[in-house]
Amino acid sequence: MARSNIPIIIQREFNERVRKKSFIISTILMPVMMIALMAAPALIMEYSRGEQKAIAVIDESGLVAPRLESDEEIRFETTDLTTDKARRELTDRFGVLYIGRDILENPSNVRLYANASTSLSVENNITGQIGKILEAEKLKAYDIEDLDRILSEVKTTVTMQTFRNDKSQEEETQAQSSGVATVLGYILGFVLYMFLLIYGSMVMQSVIEEKNNRVLEVMVSSVRPFDLMLGKILGVAAVAVVQILIWGVLIVLAGGVVMPHLMPADTMAGVQAMQQGMPDAAAMSGMDPELLQAVAAMTDLGYVLKIFGCLLLFVFGGYLLYSAMFAAVGSAVDNVQDASQLQMPITLPIILALLMMLAVIKDPNSPMAFWFSIIPFTSPVVMMARIPYDIPLWEILLSLAVLYASFVAMVWFAAKIYRVGIFMYGKKPTLKELFKWVRYKY
């Protein structure tokens, strides 16, 4: 009879959340928010430049001022005033730039007298232009005819396609892109981070609310505390899985159905050629190789399904592990404020996992990357950041096995605290007391 109560609790928790407007809104808004977070840095840089800054230039050398180029950020204006007079009279300008007579021999003889606080971008703009002008002047000393044309012809941009020789030594294999893998690793790791925090804390808040309303006292008269906790955890987990499945279907439809019809025919021809391992795929489409590889990955149904399959497994396993701990904390306190101290040991590993993800992406095959993707408290975030790099299957399976085994052990540990905590009121226990509850015999 006790076992039949778990599906009922799962159904109740699932229906309670899925039928809320907040679930529908978050399901729609989360992808939009992720895109916005990715685009935010570029938009901030675009709209944070401010007005064009006018700078008066006093060039005693006569070499630099005629070749300074104005842009959206700075407008250069030459002046015949002395430095002291320009500083006193040209206060309506952003500043006065002084360039010494011996600038070629002494590149440090440059001073900017600004009439307002300056920025690193402005200073780098000025010094970068002056540096290039001085380099060109020094090259002239070698008396090379038509130097500008020679330099433009010599300048070469190299593009490289990377193939996994340890996966296949056949020519017809799809090229790998570390750029695409890095961006995808960031996104997937951040998604795991958000899911663990949001859905884990959702379980804790639900337990606290039911405890304050004395609902738990009524429920435990017919349901074992362990079944109640497990049903609540699995019910909220089902909500997370449904949300990911919805996103997965939308992305598969966008990549496999919508995108091929929106892309030009020559672009799709290049994508298909890249998926088939043709080395001149980028030349066929005329696109940047990195961009072409990104489109090829998004339209590769097998690759997308693999990513979302792994995402489901790690979201589910990571959530189960952390929600058991959040449920234990929720049962031990009477309000969210008291829970902040006890949940700190839970949230720290999640934050550590996010920090490790940033370091691991630089070298996904390092020993640190391997171990942090195996340790269950950090593995969901770190492993999902590594999977786009096409790591060995046995590492993924080992990580999943350790993660789900740790969940079983954590449920047993958390259940010990849960069955005592739901009957405790008016006192915030310490960590020492929580461990004492675990040792109680039943």
Image (cartoon, helix red, strand yellow):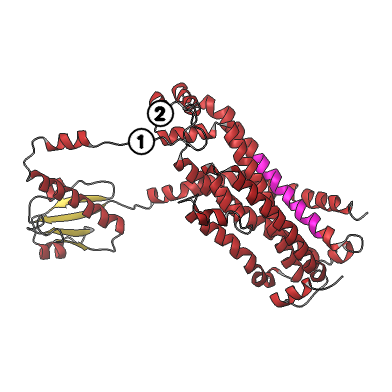
Asked if residue 15 shows in the view, the reply is yes
Which residue is situated farthest in the right direction here? 1
| Classed neighbour count for the residue bearing mark 2: other residues with Cα under 10 Å, few (<14), some (14–19), many (≥20) | many
Position of residue 288 measured from the top left corner of the image (x, y, whole percent): 39, 33
At 81% across and 66% down in the image, what residue appears?
213
Q: Quadrant of residue 408?
A: bottom right
At 16% across and 34% down in the image, what residue appears?
149
Position of residue 220 measured from the top left corner of the image (x, y, whole percent): 88, 63
Image position of 212 (left or right of 170): right
Image mark count: 2
Residue 163 inside the magenta-drawn segment: no
Kind of residue indicated by mark 1: Thr
Residue 235 inside the magenta-drawn segment: yes
Position of residue 7 measured from the top left corner of the image (x, y, whole percent): 84, 50
Where disc 1 sits, the SS reads loop
Image position of 267 (left or right of 136): right
Numbered badge on residue 393: none
Is there CB contact under 8 Å for labels 1 and 2? yes
Where disc 2 sits, the SS reads helix
Closer to us: 40 or 350? 350
Residue named by callout 1: 159
Q: Is 138 situated above or below 220?
A: above
The prevailing secondary structure element of the residues shown in magenta is helix
Closer to us: 164 or 125? 164
Kind of residue indicated by mark 2: Ala
Q: Quadrant of residue 232?
A: bottom right
Q: Is 232 situated above or below 72?
A: below
Q: Between marks 1 and 2, how big is the CA–CA gap?
A: 10 Å
Position of residue 341 measured from the top left corner of the image (x, y, whole percent): 65, 72
Numbered badge on residue 282: 2
**Residues drawn in magenta:** 229-247
User: Mark 2 or mark 1, which is nearer the start of the sequence?
Assistant: 1
